[in-house]
Image (tube, grey):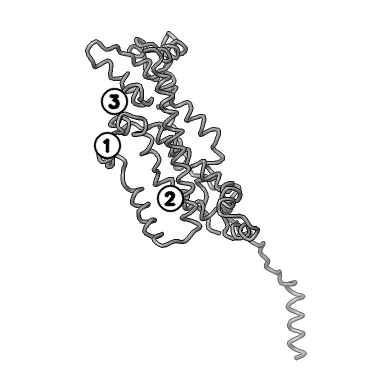
Amino acid sequence: MTELTELTAATTTASGPAPLKTSAPRLRTTRRLPTPGRPKRSVLLTVLTAVVLIYSLLPLVWLLISATKTQNGLARSFGLWFDGDFALWDNISQTLTYHDGVFLRWLLNTLLYVLAGAGGATLLAVLGGYALAKFDFPGKRAVFAVVIGAVAVPGTALAVPTFLMFSKMGLTDTPWAVIIPSLISPFGLYLMWVFAGEAIPTELMEAARIDGAGELRTFFQVALPLLAPGTVTVLLFTTVATWNNYLLPLIMLKDPDWYPLTLGLDSWNKQASTAGGDAVFNLVVTGSLLTIVPLVAAFLLLQKYWQSGLAAGSVKE
């Protein structure tokens, strides 16, 4: 034992202490994950979004630029650039006064169809969706199947049967032929059904009933304020569908005094192909621009309601 100690000491004295090999610690690089406040960027998604945006805005840009041109300017100039003569205000004036101001009559007809048809469809959708979501009754599953089936049926498939039915009742060529079919909105009913099931807590309704509120008071004072986003969403969808409706008035109406804007502007567009008819394409373009202004204004003013209405039910708690 003594010899081993002396040998170790001699070796240490001769060569010095053995150096310790220490290596610097390697830092691990952490991968930054996308956070909700800082989402990951995607070049492909950005490009696709830009393409969709251009595709959506290009017709509106063409419509706005073309509305500033005269009848001759539409033929001699490029579609996406202005002509030498800026005639927007003249075109608007001529559109409102052409044929004794029939455009204003068509505008009033469209407003009538929207207020009665789209407003009634929204009311029925709210009442039906609330009842289907919060009440149990025999045949509820059958009603659900009928609603889903009605959503899948295109409106063109019902055009001829609807015309034959209204013709037997003597309602063709009257405003009722456009208003009554517009009162039915299967998609609006289904949307309000889903929205009411998520937006109205059952406990809140039970509390109102315990406090002595009847079913009507519970609906108007408790449920209806909670259904405001969904109601606005359905109202916008039905308004756009009624405002742009073309096929139903085309087969139901013959009197130009009851035409909506879509059918009236189409009759102006067809004047150029008739014998002795005037080509008023500048008025058709300007009338189309005036037609979409109320819809754009409605979407911009009510966007916070319909955006929240579309998002309702997308997250399950």
Tell me the SS state at disc 3: loop
CB contact under 8 Å: marks 2 and 1: no
Disc 3 from disc 2: Cα separation = 34 Å
Q: What percent of the width, then of the height, locates residue 146? A: 35, 53
Which numbered mark, 2 or 1, is in the foreground of this view? 1
* Mark closest to the chain's N terminus, 3 or 2: 2
Q: What percent of the width, then of the height, locates residue 137? A: 44, 61
Q: Is residue 39 left or right of residue 49?
A: right
CB contact under 8 Å: marks 3 and 1: no
User: Which sits in the foreground, 59 or 298?
Assistant: 298
Q: What percent of the width, then of the height, locates residue 168? A: 25, 37
Residue 26: quadrant of the picture: bottom right
Residue 251: quadrant of the picture: top left
CB contact under 8 Å: marks 3 and 2: no
* Mark closest to the chain's N terminus, 3 or 1: 1
Which residue is farthest left?
275
* Mark closest to the chain's N terminus, 2 or 1: 1
Above or below residue 148? Residue 296 is above
Q: Amino acid at mark 1?
A: Phe
Q: Is residue 253 left or right of residue 65?
A: left
Disc 3 from disc 1: Cα separation = 13 Å
**Residue matched to label 1:** 163
Above or below residue 230? Residue 105 is above
Above or below residue 246? Residue 87 is above
Which numbered mark, 3 or 2, is in the foreground of this view? 3
Residue 254: which numbered mark, if any?
3
**Residue matched to label 2:** 190
Q: Amino acid at mark 2?
A: Tyr
Tell me the SS state at disc 1: helix
